[in-house]
Amino acid sequence: MIWTVVGDELCLNQTDAARWFGVSVSMFRRYEIEPSVKRGRDVYYTESTLKDALRRQSYKQGFQEGHAAKPQNAADIIEAQALAELKLTEERGETQALKNAQLRRELAPVEALTLALGSLAGEISAIVDGLPGKIKRRQPKLNKSDIEVIQRECVKAMNACAEAGLDWDEIELAE
């Protein structure tokens, strides 16, 4: 940004004033800020004019977004924008770190884990389902009531496999 001396005041041209606001020139024009000085086609804005416009725009934008925003000074607004950009940058970094961990196969999406657990539960159920018959063949001396006890326990195990899933509440408590 290049400050220009116009008369006895420091001013910014429209392009630099838009940059000062952190918006494009076309967006700056929508703010309908009256220039402090006009020289032919060139328009200039003083710092005080820009700060007042920034306060008004912030106040107006706050009401449009649903909060009763109070006018702030330019330094507070610039600091808030910098903090928001920093937070966004940190979140982008976290997102990229998670993607990299997934590519290294250190993390897996919940859908993949759910699919793997479902597949494993199905395999376990199939094995447990065949246990009573295998035990009966290996131990022919077992009576019918013994085999029924084994079958009941196998059914309990198969039901537990069918209900297997991620319990988010338990996971959060463990952390």
Image (cartoon, rainbow, N blue to C red):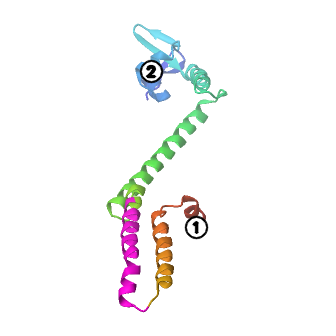
| Position above or below: 79 against 53 | below
User: Which of the image's four quarters has the N terminus?
Assistant: top left
The circle on residue 27 is 2
Please tell me how many numbered marks the rendered image carries. 2
Where is residue 37 shown, x and y percent of the image?
Answer: 50, 12
Q: Helix, strand or loop at disc 2?
A: helix
Residue toward you, 149 or 114: 149
The circle on residue 174 is 1
Q: Left or right: where does residue 59 sit relative to residue 117?
A: right
| Secondary structure mostly seen in the magenta stretch | helix
Q: Residue at x 35, y 58 (%)?
A: 100
Residue range highlighted in magenta: 115-141
Pick out the residue farthest to the left: 103
Label 2 crowd bin: few (<14), some (14–19), many (20+), radius 10 Å: few
Say whether residue 10 is visible.
yes
Q: Residue at x 46, y 20 (%)?
A: 28
Q: Amino acid at mark 1?
A: Ala
